[in-house]
Amino acid sequence: MALVLRITDHSNVWRPDALAAERTQAVRAAVKAAGDGELMRRFVAVLIAMAWLVLPVAGQSADSDILSKEDARQLFAMSKRHWEENIRGAVASGMATRVSGTPVGMKVMAPGAPVTTRLDYSRGDAKPAAVHVLVEFPPGAAPPLTPSMDKEMLANTQRQMAPDYDVAGRVERLGAGGMTFYFVITERVRR
């Protein structure tokens, strides 16, 4: 059985709670109400997609898509000023909170788990050096993954993003059934 993630069609995925669909609709409504245009809607869709870090129903296969190459291209093309504007817009719309510290980022309350996305501008303000994604499932809301499933999920994501991007990741299991996913996506250096 191949272990993959699906974010493009959520009709057959495990849902952490009965309110997941309502929260998804609330986030979509907030984005629409914000009126920041197609780029903001696309950006928020990326963040929501990252939050759907869940498995298809047993035995069903799907394409892995934590972050698509097109989404990565958009994020890696974003200047620090543009990223800051996106954060301000998301915070003003009420759909995100600013995350203090470095690298600069925001946290979106997505279905089942908050998703923090940070863009690392340590090499200059023109474009990020890396995209950091943190998905924090609270106790009782974490997907039922085994350590071998974690490794397979990461391997699938790495294959999906190759050859353009490198993905490093890990899963931390917390007491009382919580789980945190850490991902760092970087552009692959071409020689």
Image (cartoon, rainbow, N blue to C red):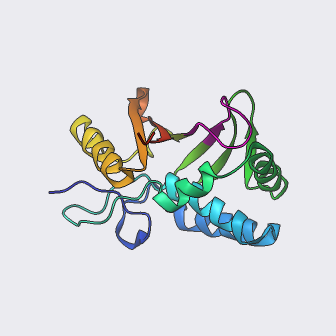
**Is residue 120 found inside the magenta-colored segment of the image?**
yes
Q: In the visual, does 3 lie left or right of 129? A: left
Q: In the visual, does 171 lie left or right of 87? A: left
**Vertical comparison of 93 with 10: above or below:** above
Report the quarter where the N terminus lies. Answer: bottom left
Query: Residue drawn at (43%, 52%), measured in percent from left and top?
Result: 53
Depth check: 99 or 74 in front?
Answer: 74
| Residue 57 x/y as whole percent | 28, 63
**Whether residue 111 can be seen here:** no
**Is residue 127 found inside the magenta-colored segment of the image?**
yes
Give the residues in magenta: 117-131
As drawn, the residue found furthest toward the front would be: 191
Depth check: 37 or 55 in front?
Answer: 37
| Residue 24 x/y as whole percent | 59, 65
**Residue 10 falls in which quadrant of the image?**
bottom left
Query: Residue drawn at (47%, 54%), measured in percent from left and top?
Result: 67
| Residue 155 x/y as whole percent | 28, 44
Q: In the visual, does 75 lie left or right of 143? A: right
**Vertical comparison of 69 with 136: above or below:** below
Query: Residue drawn at (24%, 54%), measured in percent from left and top?
Result: 3
Q: Main secondary structure of the magenta part?
A: loop
Q: In the visual, does 55 lie left or right of 25? A: left
**Whether residue 70 can be seen here:** yes
Report the quarter where the C terminus lies. Answer: top left
**Vertical comparison of 95 with 139: above or below:** below
Q: How many marks?
A: 0
**Residue 98 falls in which quadrant of the image?**
top right
**Vertical comparison of 71 with 141: above or below:** below
Query: Residue drawn at (36%, 50%), measured in percent from left and top?
Result: 163
Depth check: 79 or 177 in front?
Answer: 79
As drawn, the residue found furthest toward the left would be: 1
| Residue 145 x/y as whole percent | 29, 43
